[in-house]
Image (cartoon, rainbow, N blue to C red):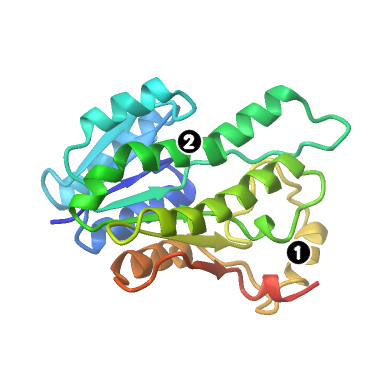
């Protein structure tokens, strides 16, 4: 039985990745920071489906101490999904050091040091790391400069670690487009229609699209260093 750790796995895209991996035969470790209730409920639901197949781990991944504590709790690992992220606007003239540290630490620093700490476990199983990136790593979103920079760094980290960790560990990325509407974004139909107009397939994706791509990469033993855009063709357009 393979084991997967999904950071930020209690809600939204992360929760679907956890469910899809579990359905495909993985034991799952659900990481959370603040979403304790959701993480424990998801773990309970999955354990009802298959006994002793899901556990939870709380950690603040911005803390190297917490990362080290997490490492001590994981004894076997085949797949690490770096999904945890923060997303909010930082207009250039309002951006400050606090926002920089918050976004870059969560979106870029923590995946790097978590990958570093778990490398030996992953190498024992010839495992895989999948980073959840964003199309805005290449197509910057206005007023989100720090977020864009953090995800662009994660894309480069994916390619860099694919070289540095080979041949023992594969490293790939999934770059979502419009999947779930951000909680702090306008919800009026006119704004949403403007977003859809830029997507060739003229519809939003869903969380299953991202989760299925993670499973595909986890199972593709001759793919490394690749980033798959799951964006309905958005990255093709101006």
Which of 48/107 is in front?
107
Residue annotated with mark 1: 195
Where 137 sits versus 45, above or below? below
Return the mark for residue 219: none
Q: Position of residue 121 (x, y in %)?
A: 22, 44
Residue at 84% over, 29% down: 94
| Element on which disc 2 rests | helix
The N terminus lies in quadrant: bottom left
Q: Please give the residue where the numbered disc 2 appears in the rendered image.
A: 110
* Of the image marks 2 and 1, the number of the one nearer the N terminus: 2
Quarter of the rendering containing residue 91:
top right
Farthest residue in the bottom direction? 200
Task: Identify the residue shown where x is 33% and y is 74%.
Answer: 222
Q: Position of residue 208 (x, y in %)?
A: 44, 64
- On the image, the x and y values in percent for residue 99 come to 69, 28
Q: Quadrant of the C terminus?
A: bottom right
Q: Nearer the viewer, residue 44 or 158?
A: 158
Q: Is 137 left, or right, of 222 in this rendering? A: right
Left or right: 180 with respect to 92?
left
């Amino acid at each position: 039985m393979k084991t997967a750790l999904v950071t930020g796995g209690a809600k939204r895209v992360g929760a679907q990745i956890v469910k899809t991996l579990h359905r495909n035969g993985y034991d799952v470790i659900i990481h959370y920071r603040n979403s304790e209730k959701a993480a424990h409920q998801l773990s309970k639901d999955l354990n009802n489906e298959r006994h002793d197949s899901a556990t939870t781990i709380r950690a603040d991944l911005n803390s190297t101490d917490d990362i080290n504590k997490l490492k001590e709790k994981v004894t076997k690992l085949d797949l690490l999904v770096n999904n945890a992220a923060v997303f909010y606007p930082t207009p250039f003239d309002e951006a400050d050091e606090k926002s920089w540290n918050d976004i870059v630490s969560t979106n870029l620093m923590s995946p790097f040091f978590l990958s570093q700490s778990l490398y030996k476990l992953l190498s024992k199983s010839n495992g895989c790391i999948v980073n959840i990136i964003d199309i805005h790593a290449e197509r910057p979103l206005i007023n989100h400069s720090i977020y864009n920079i953090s995800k662009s760094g994660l894309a480069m980290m994916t390619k860099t670690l694919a070289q540095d960790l080979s041949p023992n560990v594969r490293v790939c990325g999934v770059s979502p487009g419009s999947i779930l509407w951000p909680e702090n974004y306008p919800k009026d139909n006119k704004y949403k229609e403007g977003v859809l107009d830029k997507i060739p397939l003229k519809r939003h994706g869903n969380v299953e699209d991202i989760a299925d791509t993670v499973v595909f990469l986890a199972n593709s033993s001759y793919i490394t260093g690749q980033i798959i855009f799951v964006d309905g063709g958005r990255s093709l357009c101006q």
